Image (cartoon, helix red, strand yellow):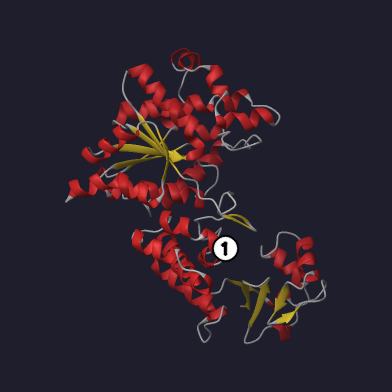
Amino acid sequence: MEEIKMSNVFEVLKDRGYIKQMTHEEEIKELLAKEKVTFYIGFDPTADSLHVGHFIAMMFMSHMQQHGHRPIALIGGGTAQIGDPSGRTDMRQMMTDEIIAHNVASIKKQMEKFIDFSDDKALLVNNADWLRGLNYIDFIRDIGSQFSVNRMLSAECFKSRMENGGLSFLEFNYMLMQGYDFLVLNRKFGCTMQLGGDDQWSNMIAGVDLIRKKDRKQGYAMTCTLLTNSEGNKMGKTAKGALWLDPEKTSPYEFYQYWRNLPDADVAQPLALLTFLPMDEVRRLSSLEGAEINEAKKVLAYEVTKIVHGKEEAEKAKQASEALFGQGGLDLTNVPTSEVTEEVLGKGVVDLMVELGLLKTKSEGRRLVQQNGLTINDEKVTDFAMEITNDLFIDGAMMIKQGKKKYNRIVIK
């Protein structure tokens, strides 16, 4: 049974649309069918939570593990001190050791939801363990000598930086570091394959080349399709910024609503990449048209929320959504809720919303009011300076709606 499962993983990944580029297609296909492969994906701890862009990599990794292969989740505690220039037009903000350590600890907890690390089925390692102790001269002589500057400058990950004000020598080292990671993992754990987002292609090739030059061994690289909308832009951006996997940063309800409200043309790709639904079902749901496409959106929102936040939170988010958007008669307590004290009475509505993080700025609130986009208890707010009064709290709760679909409940404790 195990042999059959392992032989299918390449076709599974291809059928679901994960695979974008690879170094040796026939060899990779044969390797994944015949051997238990140790592979890795790197995650730089630039924040204290993974976001939906990382989630696709976690799903990529999960499919591989389910088919008998061993993942290494590499946390970039060392590379985060440099910053990956891939896909950026500006330099990343430098982080302190304390911030990096905090972010690493937070990300580790999240990864355990998706990957089984028990009994050596997967490894979690931090490249700070080998990068921080490097002697610079030794490193440049041993590793830097294997890299062609001309070839590096032609890499896609450096091009946009060169065209937009230049590339710092600090960032120029990033490709060396990522290539060195692959070499270390190959030597220490027998890791023969690197997976990652398609924007990492140049860095991944560097690792494959380095293993060949230094140890005369064959490494492999396979990139994953980036999650994009029908216009070709990265998916997962909200009004508040990134769509985070941490429920404190993006609530399960907000997470659910993001997928529930996708444009019709954007539903098919996340159904294939971010759920474990059989592909026959994915194709059926993706082919729905008109009002029926809402069924696909509901399934997508529920399945993705269940994987990230668990079945209980997915059920709550689903019930809250149905209560607000046409189903009626259900419990509204699952709508995002903020507790306040009676001290809010007399305060401006917009001021309170900024205080609670429901708006970024007062000027955003002014625009919302001017566009008739702010509603309290089903009444349009027409006065930007409107104050909070006791009669706005019906049964102790006030319902605020921004736009057509964003609800928040304010409760006096």
Q: Is residue 42 visible?
A: no
Residue 241: x, y in percent? 62, 54
Q: Is residue 251 left or right of residue 29?
A: right
At 53% from the left and 80% from the top, the residue drawn is: 323
At 47% from the left and 43% from the top, the residue drawn is: 104
In this view, 319 is above or below 368:
below
**The image quarter in which residue 410 lies:** bottom right
**The image quarter in which residue 143 lies:** top left
Question: Element under label 1?
Answer: loop
Residue 404: x, y in percent? 65, 73
Residue 208: x, y in percent? 39, 26
Count of numbered circles in the view: 1
Q: Nearer the viewer, residue 27 or 344?
A: 27
In this view, 349 is above or below 49:
below
**The image quarter in which residue 274 lies:** bottom left
Q: Is residue 228 visible?
A: yes
Q: Nearer the viewer, residue 375 or 225?
A: 225
Q: Nearer the viewer, residue 190 or 137?
A: 190
Q: Which residue is mark 1?
A: 263
Mark 1: few/some/many CA within 10 Å (<14, 14-19, 20+) = few
Q: Is residue 355 left or right of residue 201?
A: right
Q: Is residue 277 left or right of residue 4?
A: right
